[in-house]
Amino acid sequence: MSNSIDKPSYTLWQLVLYMLRLGAFGFGGPVALVGYMHRDLVEQRKWITEADYKEGLALSQLAPGPLAAQLGIYLGYVHYRIIGATLAGLAFVVPSFIMVVALGWAYVRFGGISWMQAVFYGVGAAVIGIIAMSARKLTEKSIGKDKLLWAIYLVLAVVTVITESEIAWLFIAAGVLVWLLRAPPRWLGKSNLNGVALMQLPIGGSLIGTWDASQLTQIALFFAKAGAFVFGSGLAIVPFLYGGTVTEHQWLTEKQFVDAVAVAMITPGPVVITVGFIGYLVAGLPGAAVAAGATFLPCYLFTIIPAPYFKKYGKLPSVIAFVDGITAAAIGAIAGSVIVIAKRSIVDVPTAVIALITVALLWRFKKLQEPVVIAAAAALGLGLYPLLH
């Protein structure tokens, strides 16, 4: 059995306060956020064991929905079960939700946010440096010198760069490969199947698009579908949102959608919180609340429903091998996503310099806080962008 059943060394409210702080000051998107959780909760505070963290990361990659939010929910579940998962998830999401709603209000009131491009010019480049350092730390800690895991890691990194997406079945294939090579089963037991089967259960999929509903109900159904059926971390949901909000429903213009994505990138917390900004533009505060709630509810359910199976069977050799394979694949995909995002954010020499300086500063000064780097990058963007464009 997992040692997570032992008496925790922290209180539930300490974890909630940590998640509030991460949601309020955690820049860099899902790649950086999962790295912060490992650094803070596993390495420094030792609230969460390495095994529990890896189980959470594996489950978060297998299930659809936003990666960082799912991992935060799972880490809340480790010692405090449903109440811990619920409060940790809310604490992680609420700060950035409040920020994007405030930005949505300013956007509507003042007719757009002209300074956003300038801020994102600097912040987007700095974010590349932050997530590159996070990916490096995760790689060193979880992959080590294991040749099989390195092979899986490299394959997933290359596939992510080429396809610019995360392919869910490859994560499962990696887990099965390591399982078969390192802990080959003599028989197929329920302990190896139940968790995966539960993670593949759709939530209300047959109802999507069949109702003649009000606008808020349409918003709820569309964003629930986004949360329940889109795999991949952070920006993976963006193409789906574009197709629904701009092309299908025509709720937003092209410029409004681009601004919505920029808002998600310059605010802390999960990138997927852009749904709150989009919902606000479509239907005000009720639209923002419905869009965010509908997006995050499926990922919450996809985390807490399989979690007991991961906790019950997590120490079996076959499950450990399966999780090791998925973890290697997940971190490989995270490393590949650094390159994918960099291609969009590093557009000229100044942005490349900002990214390199960010890496150098974080490498040299281990205790340098990321929000300080983000603030400096934003100031650089505001100063440089008008001169260069």
Image: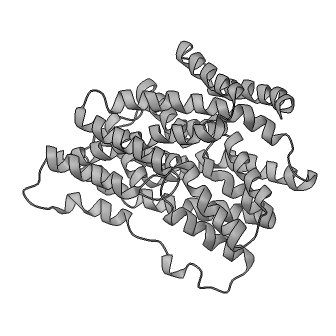
Q: Looking at the picture, does residue 306 appear above or below residue 102?
A: below
* Residue beneath the point at 17% across and 45% down: 317
Task: Locate residue 42: give its quadrant.
Answer: top left
Frontmost residue, 316 versus 362: 362
Quadrant including the N terminus: top left
Q: How many marks?
A: 0
Classify residue 43 as left or right of residue 92.
Answer: left
Where residue 171 sits in the image (x, y, percent)? 35, 51
User: What colour scheme has been applied to the protein in the rendered image?
Assistant: one colour
Task: Locate residue 377: give its quadrant.
Answer: top right
* Residue beneath the point at 80% across and 42% down: 116
Where residue 223 sits in the image (x, y, percent)? 62, 66
- Find the residue positioned furthest to the right: 110
* Residue beneath the point at 47% across and 51% down: 163
Classify residue 331 as left or right of residue 346.
Answer: left
- Find the residue positioned furthest to the left: 186
Where residue 210 sits in the image (x, y, percent)? 59, 85
Quadrant including the C terminus: top right
Where residue 33 sits in the image (x, y, percent)? 54, 38
